[in-house]
Image: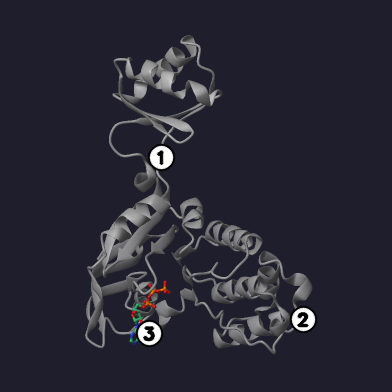
């Protein structure tokens, strides 16, 4: 297995009570990237993380984190952090005492500076001495993340870190994840159902459905419009759409043009002719509000791939 990856999963299968949840799952996560692991409820995302952490045995296949099998390697396990949905915090202890408790478990030397640094990073300095039971869901999640990275792991697994958070709190968590991947050069393995969040912060994703990986690629490649270049044109005067469509269709380099709600969608023979299309529409007297190259959302990609799994599990 390639040692340069932070995570390698090859041919992983696992059943519960005769039901095969994972059926030959293969993907890898490069060092330093923010990786998004996507899939419907019950697809087996948490199960994959638990096997990677060595908490659950695989049925078949191999899992490596930092080139090691964490079930067998305590030293490697110390280089990994994890946040499950319950945050792993004691409500009766203060924020600082929760971190101090974990610092003791990890046997950190003089953790005080690290605790101060993390309370600042997750914006909880003001509440450091308050019991965690008095915290909002978002504050608990941020402290949970601080707890997961206290010992400066090289890889951190975050299982749905933004679930149950309001949009403001989601944004704080998202910024925090980007910050720690950059500042602490951590590899981040993110399980998430928030596809807009994943599209913004992850470099690579895998989509798990029906026990198999349906897509595994960079977000950039997945969301690039496939096939011939496609343009979206928005006219200042909506009443012009039908005539503008005829004008576009008459151009030799426009192979298709459809009205789609408020926009015109034109398929071109070659990306090099985009300026010609804009010039031709303007010369014909159409006032253009917006012209952009189409790309697909991660949500579209996700739904296409998850649709394939129907009836497969
Ligand atoms: N210890 C277990 N015993 C029996 N079944 C289990 C066990 N752990 C998980 N499962 C089943 O395996 C399937 C996958 O669960 P898992 O928690 O990995 O899904 P998930 O993709 O993380 O889902 P979600 O998005 O809802 O969190 C589910 O049907 C779950 O009920």
Q: Decide which of 269, 244 is in the foreground and name it.
A: 244
Answer yes or no: do the residues labelled 3 and 2 have beta carbons within 8 Å? no
295 lies left or right of 141: left
Q: Position of residue 149 (x, y in %)?
A: 55, 72
Q: Position of residue 211 (x, y in %)?
A: 26, 70
Q: Secondary structure at mark 2?
A: loop
Are there few (<14), some (14-19), or many (20+) residues within 10 Å of tag 3?
Answer: few
The answer to which image quadrant residue 135 occupies is bottom right
Q: CA distance from mark 3 to mark 2?
A: 33 Å
Is residue 181 visible from the viewing direction of this image? yes
Q: What label does residue 129 carry, if any?
A: 2
The residue identified by callout 1 is: 295
Q: CA distance from mark 3 to mark 1?
A: 40 Å
What residue do we see at 66% from left, 65% from top?
121
Q: Secondary structure at mark 3?
A: loop
The residue identified by callout 3 is: 55
Q: Quadrant of the N terminus?
A: bottom left
Q: Decide which of 284, 88 is in the foreground and name it.
A: 284
What residue do we see at 27% from left, 81% from top?
58
Q: Position of residue 304 (x, y in %)?
A: 32, 54
Q: Quadrant of ligand 1?
A: bottom left
Are there few (<14), some (14-19), or many (20+) residues within 10 Å of tag 2?
Answer: few
216 lies left or right of 76: left
- In the image, is residue 232 above or below residue 215? above
The answer to which image quadrant residue 215 occupies is bottom left
Q: Decide which of 63, 25 is in the foreground and name it.
A: 25
Mark 2 Cβ inside 8 Å of ligand 1: no
Is residue 4 visible from the viewing direction of this image? no
- In the image, is residue 198 above or below residue 139? above
């Amino acid at each position: 297995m390639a040692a340069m990856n932070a995570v390698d999963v090859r041919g992983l299968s696992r059943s519960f009570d005769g039901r095969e949840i994972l059926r030959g799952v293969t993907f890898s996560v490069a060092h330093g990237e923010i990786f998004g692991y996507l899939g419907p409820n019950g697809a087996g995302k948490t199960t994959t993380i638990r096997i990677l952490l060595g908490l659950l045995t695989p049925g078949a296949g191999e899992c490596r984190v930092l080139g090691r099998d964490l079930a067998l390697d305590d030293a490697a396990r110390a280089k990994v952090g994890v946040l499950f949905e319950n945050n792993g915090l004691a409500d009766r202890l203060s924020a600082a005492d929760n971190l101090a408790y974990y610092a003791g478990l990890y046997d950190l030397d003089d953790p005080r500076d690290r605790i101060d640094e993390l309370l600042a990073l997750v914006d909880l300095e003001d509440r450091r001495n308050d019991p965690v039971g008095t915290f909002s869901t978002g504050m608990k999640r941020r402290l949970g993340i601080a707890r997961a990275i206290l010992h400066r792991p090289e890889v951190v697994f975050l299982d749905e870190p933004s679930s149950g958070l309001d949009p403001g709190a989601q944004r704080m968590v998202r910024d925090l994840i980007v910050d720690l991947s950059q500042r602490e050069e951590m590899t981040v393995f993110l399980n998430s159902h928030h596809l807009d969040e994943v599209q913004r912060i992850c470099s690579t994703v895998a989509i798990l459905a029906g026990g198999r990986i349906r897509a595994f690629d960079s977000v950039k490649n997945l969301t690039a419009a496939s096939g011939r270049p496609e343009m979206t044109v928005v006219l200042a005067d909506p009443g012009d759409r039908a005539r503008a469509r005829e004008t576009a269709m008459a151009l030799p380099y426009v192979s298709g043009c459809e009205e789609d709600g408020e926009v015109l969608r034109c398929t071109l023979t070659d990306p090099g002719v985009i300026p010609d299309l804009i010039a031709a529409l303007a010369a014909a007297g159409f006032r253009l509000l917006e012209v952009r190259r189409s790309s697909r959302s991660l949500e579209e990609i996700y739904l296409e791939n998850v649709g394939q799994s129907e009836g497969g599990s």
